[in-house]
Image (cartoon, rainbow, N blue to C red):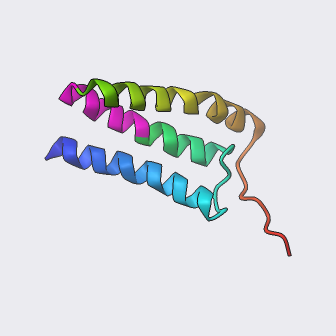
Amino acid sequence: MFYQTISLIGAALLLIGFVGMQLSRIRNDGALFNALNFAGSALLAWVAIHDRRAGFIILEVVWALVSLPPLYRAMRGGTSVPPQRAA
């Protein structure tokens, strides 16, 4: 039950970032999007490691690692602001 809850939280974090980006509420190069991606994929990687699911371990670990450089750049450059919609 514990790992199921952790996996649901991880999936929710990833989906919040994805939906926010699709709705132009979150920038895909911003700190929030990449933090959500990192946290969600790290939680899912933890569950995959516990369950010994090699394919999911690779997927989630790579996903987490790929989100770190843009997260670092976004945090160094300031906060992320959603893009302005055209009038």
Residue 16 position in % (x across, y down):
48, 56
Residue 19 position in % (x across, y down):
53, 60
Task: Give 10 or 52, whichever is nearer the viewer.
Answer: 52
> At 58% from the left edge and 41% from the top edge, which residue is drawn?
34
- Give left or right: position of 27 versus 44: right
Q: Which residues are magenta?
A: 41-52
What count of labels does the image hold?
0
- Give left or right: position of 40 versus 2: right
Residue 42 is drawn in which quadrant? Answer: top left
* Image quarter of the C terminus: bottom right
Magenta stretch mostly in which secondary structure?
helix
Q: Is residue 4 shown above or below 16? A: above
Q: Residue furthest front?
A: 55
Q: Residue furthest right?
A: 87
> At 39% from the left edge and 54% from the top edge, which residue is drawn?
12
Q: Residue furthest left?
A: 1
> At 69% from the left edge and 43% from the top edge, which residue is drawn?
29
Q: Is residue 54 shown above or below 26? A: above
Q: Is residue 45 magenta?
A: yes
Residue 49 position in % (x across, y down):
26, 26
> At 45% from the left edge and 54% from the top edge, which residue is drawn?
15
- Give left or right: position of 1 versus 60: left
Q: Is residue 8 magenta?
A: no
